[in-house]
Image (tube, rainbow, N blue to C red):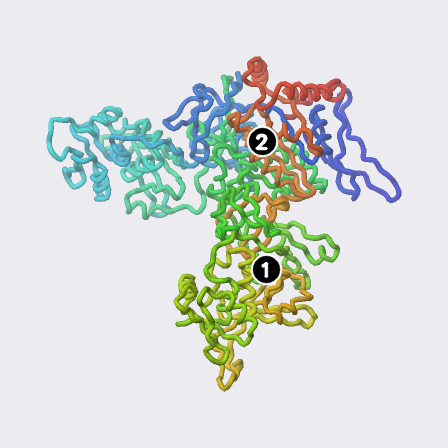
């Protein structure tokens, strides 16, 4: 199936014009093309060209339903020869010997299980040659993940594409393949430590009676001595020659000599040496130690350019060295250097020189002298270029699938190779017709769980394996240029399920929970956070996003939050408010471009919390209202005293004193608390760290801030009854202010107000000698800055009647986005919440969002997802969005009890607004041998569809047969070859 673009006819006023019919070849029957849009605005017309009735059925169901399930088998496999190497934890095996369930190395350096094996029969060999002298034998349909040198785009292509495009017109190489990460083979137990093995292969003599090596540097001698087993030492024969011998003589043989014999390297001259097979497949640390031994002995570093190389007279050792470098994620190539002439006219032996390029984090040398000369690369990092493709004869081939999300695995010489788009075509069509704004593709992450966010690299680099399969489909639909524009314009978002939430905050962002504050990095699935209504809502998923570019979103009330560029915000612009459009969802990037309008006005109004949040109740030892009064007008130094002329406030405080405590008039307006043998109040103030504090150091204890609504409100009333004022603004609206010399206390008051559904912001009033005033013969001097908090809230923050009566005619709280400032890169996390509006609170009760609107969301490979994962995906369904779920229940990598696709289908089948299309095998283009194999295997009851009963199979077959009847009149069978 492909998408074609047609030039629309010119539309004239008062005339109705029908789009012209696409031309067809004479004598060929094709399916009628379906117009994509009604072209109301004289836009370009887009057409879908269907290859069979099943595709036409799928598109009809897509138009009718908001959620569509496309179920059916996959297409043709991509093959390697049976002699191709695959790497297991203990070494390599051949493709012919691989078994389902066996673990083989993938491009990330880890191991993935083989989930399926597909014999491909006889196919022509395409030998792909690479710049490092290696090659891979495969079929012409085999898929490769390559990067274009001219534009940097990474994409998935087949071998035929490599053959045509591997070289530019000027003869330079065009396509490259990234090297694998260091392969994490299992750690091995060696009798000869890897570093010593490297030294013996490079500088050792293994043909005499003792194990000897030559080394000028004391560092080499020291490390070898340190790694020897107890009872063995290095003895120096001359300045540079050393022997590994027993510390005390005994009748037992030298264990290192015996080990060398077992490994087959004893008695070998320099030109015969090789790396023993088991040493090639040690752990990463062990292979690095082996590399360091070889490089400390026979490795060189260019003093001018810092280039690194290794030399040996053994061709076998040079080949093994290359294998070692490839397994560590590097590149190298062997170059032959003729030996120099001797005096007698003969030549020295041929030297094999291996120039190498390894990632900067691999320590190539142990020797400090060489390590200091090595220049770490800022560009030209390890990669392999495609040299040419050579066509050979036919041979038996085989294809496998592995359970990592991008289906990449390692073959000969650790080359990364690749191993599936009707749903994508539908989605692109909607975007091009401007009915939807985004295409969002996701896939489940099998085995790796939700830890992909911690993979190194930028977000784009981590997602490249997911983006690559989409390029071919997009290019076939709208052309290469348009595909690039769609990506650049962020119309296409592709991510594994772990990134699906993708609207992330910094791990250091504070999330208020019913049990107190947590950082975003501490949130776990099942935790409770607060929704926009102030009620607790459960966290359904936590999705690490790795290191992302972040922005600090600053609001007019002084609050701020650090988030990624695609984080979602419910905001309302001035224009949207004017037209009563309400709050809409925008990304940080969209807001950043339009923070101010042309009149320099802030235009993005934030949603605010209108209800108090419900923290879990906590026990407190001091009455909250009394504590608020003491923090406001109390003196807590040496004794507990409160200053007030308001008898109503004093009487209220008296009621809340502990038993046997009372106020004693001290003079003027001061009242001291007399404990009368009960020091509970004083001890509690000491426990909270408030006793003996000056006014400018006061604060609200955490136990009170994170308490129930009633406790927080009474505490705030005590604070505002003492140090708060209420008046009338010139606009006639009620104006509440709180003043304190303690910055921390002012911040705590703002926290209380916001947590109670109010709005607060703080401003600094610097002290001045002019502000001093007289009081009863005393000069009251201002020696500290004052922090003034402006407050707007529906709940009455006063208990005093003279203040509470004025709490009327409240202004409507507003909160605007003041600025969006880049703040570098940071580790980010996203969460999904159970709240119906997908809103949750972050930092100082800022409302933030986590769903998708105006999008086509595609869940690919859903057979590898659990019931919970698919349920979470469906919960992302936003306003004016569509969802397409694709998958084949027969191809699941999960255990039967863990598979969620058919469980979801069974539960949603009769729900209005959801469509189901089941593709039969006849709709899929496959290799004939595969068809024969599957036909034979389907006779076995063991491959019946999981979680689907016989009645469901019959129902689907009957439903589909109605659509597949008489298809011969609608399309030409030959055209099926164009669609997989």
Q: Residue at x 72, y 52 (%)?
A: 581
User: Answer yes or no: do the residues labelled 1 and 2 have beta carbons within 8 Å?
Assistant: no
Which structural element holds mark 1?
strand
Q: Residue at x 54, y 52 (%)?
A: 563
Q: Which residue is mark 2?
A: 862
Left or right relative to 77: residue 31: right
> How far apart are the alpha carbons under marks 1 and 2?
40 Å
Residue 408 at what x, y percent from top left? 49, 31
Q: Front-most of 352 and 883?
A: 883
Q: Residue at x 51, y 62 (%)?
A: 624
Splitting the image into 4 quarters, where does residue 852 fall?
Answer: top right
Residue 379 at what x, y percent from top left? 45, 45
Left or right relative to 861: residue 455: left
Q: Front-most of 500 and 140?
A: 500
Q: Exactly how many numbered labels are in the figure?
A: 2
Q: Which residue is mark 1?
A: 555
Splitting the image into 4 quarters, where does residue 647 fall?
Answer: bottom right
Splitting the image into 4 quarters, where does residue 710 fall?
Answer: bottom right
Query: Quadrant where the N terminus lies?
Result: top right
In the image, residue 400 above or below residue 634? above
Which structural element holds mark 2?
helix
- Work out whether mark 1 precedes mark 2 in sequence or the reverse, and give the earlier one: 1
Label 2 Cα crowd, 10 Å radius (few <14 / some 14-19 / many 20+): many
Q: Does the image show residue 3?
A: no
């Amino acid at each position: 199936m492909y998408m074609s673009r047609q030039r629309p006819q010119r539309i004239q006023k008062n005339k109705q014009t029908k789009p012209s019919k696409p031309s067809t070849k004479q004598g060929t029957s094709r399916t009628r093309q379906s117009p994509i849009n009604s072209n109301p605005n004289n836009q370009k017309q887009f057409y879908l060209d269907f290859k069979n009735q099943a595709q036409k059925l799928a598109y009809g169901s897509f138009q009718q339903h908001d959620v569509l399930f496309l179920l059916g088998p996959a297409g043709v496999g991509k093959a390697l020869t049976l002699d191709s190497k695959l790497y297991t934890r203990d070494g390599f095996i051949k493709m012919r010997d691989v078994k389902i369930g066996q673990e083989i190395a993938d491009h990330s350096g880890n191991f993935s299980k083989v989930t399926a094996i597909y014999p491909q029969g006889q196919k022509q060999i395409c030998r792909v040659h690479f710049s490092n002298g290696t090659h891979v034998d495969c079929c012409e349909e085999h898929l490769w993940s390559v990067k274009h040198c001219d534009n940097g785009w990474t994409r998935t292509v087949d071998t035929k594409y490599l053959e045509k495009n591997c070289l530019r017109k000027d003869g330079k190489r065009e396509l490259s393949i990234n090297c694998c990460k260091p392969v994490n083979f299992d750690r091995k137990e060696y009798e000869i430590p890897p570093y010593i093995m490297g030294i013996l292969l490079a500088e050792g003599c293994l043909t005499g009676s003792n194990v000897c090596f030559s080394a000028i540097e004391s560092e080499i001698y020291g490390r070898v001595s340190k790694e020897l087993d107890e009872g063995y030492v290095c003895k120096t024969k001359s300045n540079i020659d050393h022997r590994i011998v027993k510390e005390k003589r005994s009748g037992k043989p030298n264990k290192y000599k015996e080990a060398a014999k077992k490994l087959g390297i004893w008695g070998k001259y320099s030109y015969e040496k090789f790396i023993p097979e088991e040493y090639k497949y040690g752990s990463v640390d062990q292979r690095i130690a082996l590399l360091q031994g070889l490089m400390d002995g026979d490795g060189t570093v260019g003093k001018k350019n810092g280039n690194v190389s290794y030399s040996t007279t053994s061709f076998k050792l040079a080949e093994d060295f290359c294998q070692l470098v490839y397994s560590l994620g590097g590149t190298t190539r062997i170059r032959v250097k003729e030996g120099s002439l001797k005096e007698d006219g003969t030549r020295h032996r041929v030297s094999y020189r291996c120039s190498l390029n390894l990632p900067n984090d691999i320590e190539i040398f142990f020797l400090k002298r060489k390590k200091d000369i090595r220049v770490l690369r800022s560009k030209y990092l390890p990669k392999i270029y495609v040299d040419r493709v050579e066509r050979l004869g036919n041979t038996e081939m085989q294809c496998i699938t592995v359970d990592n999300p991008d289906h990449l695995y390692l073959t000969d010489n650790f080359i990364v190779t690749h191993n599936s788009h009707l749903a994508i075509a539908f989605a692109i069509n909607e975007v091009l017709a401007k009915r939807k704004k985004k295409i969002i593709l996701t896939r489940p992450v099998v085995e790796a769980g939700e830890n992909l966010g911690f993979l190194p690299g930028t977000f784009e680099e981590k997602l490249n394996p997911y983006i690559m399969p989409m390029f071919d489909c997009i290019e076939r639909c709208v052309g290469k240029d348009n595909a690039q524009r769609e990506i650049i314009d962020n119309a296409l978002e592709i991510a594994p399920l772990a990134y699906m939430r993708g609207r992330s905050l910094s791990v250091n962002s504070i999330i208020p929970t019913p049990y107190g504050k947590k950082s975003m990095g501490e949130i776990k699935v099942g935790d409770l956070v607060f929704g926009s209504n102030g009620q607790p809502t459960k966290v359904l998923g936590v999705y690490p996003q790795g290191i992302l570019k972040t922005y600090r979103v600053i609001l007019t009330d002084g609050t701020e939050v650090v988030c990624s560029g695609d984080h979602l915000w419910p905001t309302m612009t001035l224009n949207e408010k004017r037209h009563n459009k309400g709050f809409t969802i925008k990304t940080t990037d969209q807001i950043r471009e339009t923070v101010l309008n042309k009149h320099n006005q802030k235009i993005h109004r934030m949603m605010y919390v209108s209800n108090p949040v419900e923290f879990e109740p906590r026990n407190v030892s001091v009455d909250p209202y009394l504590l608020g009064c003491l923090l406001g007008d109390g003196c807590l130094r040496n004794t507990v005293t409160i200053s007030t002329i308001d008898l109503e406030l004093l009487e209220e405080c008296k009621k809340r004193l502990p038993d046997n405590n009372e106020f004693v008039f001290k003079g003027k307006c001061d009242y001291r608390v007399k404990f009368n043998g009960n020091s509970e109040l004083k001890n509690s103030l000491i426990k909270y760290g408030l006793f003996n504090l000056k006014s400018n150091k006061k604060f609200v204890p955490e136990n009170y801030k994170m308490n129930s609504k009633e406790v927080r409100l009474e505490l705030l009333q005590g604070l505002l009854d003492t140090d708060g004022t209420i008046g009338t603004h010139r606009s006639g609206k009620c104006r509440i202010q709180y003043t304190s010399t303690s910055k921390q206390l002012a911040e705590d008051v703002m926290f209380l107000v916001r947590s109670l559904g109010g709005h607060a912001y703080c401003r600094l009033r610097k002290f001045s000698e002019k502000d001093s005033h007289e009081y009863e013969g005393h000069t009251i001097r201002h020696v500290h800055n004052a922090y003034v908090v402006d407050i707007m809230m529906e709940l009455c923050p006063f208990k005093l009647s003279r203040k509470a009566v004025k709490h009327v005619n409240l202004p409507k709280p507003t909160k605007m986005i003041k600025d969006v400032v880049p703040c570098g890169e940071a580790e980010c996390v996203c969460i999904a919440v159970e709240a119906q509006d997908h809103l949750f609170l972050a930092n100082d009760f800022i409302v933030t969002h986590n769903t998708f609107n105006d999008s086509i969301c595609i869940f690919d490979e859903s057979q590898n997802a659990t019931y919970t994962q698919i349920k979470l995906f469906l919960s992302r369904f936003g306003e004016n969005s569509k969802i397409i779920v694709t998958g084949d229940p027969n191809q699941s990598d999960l255990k039967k009890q863990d598979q969620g696709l058919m469980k979801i289908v069974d539960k949603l089948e009769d729900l209005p607004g959801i469509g189901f299309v089941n593709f039969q095998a006849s709709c899929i283009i496959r290799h004939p041998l595969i068809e024969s194999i599957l036909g034979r295997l389907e006779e076995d009851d063991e491959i019946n569809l999981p979680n689907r009963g016989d009645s469901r199979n019959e129902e689907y077959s009957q439903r589909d047969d109605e659509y597949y009847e008489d298809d011969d009149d609608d399309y030409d069978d030959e055209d099926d070859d164009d669609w997989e």
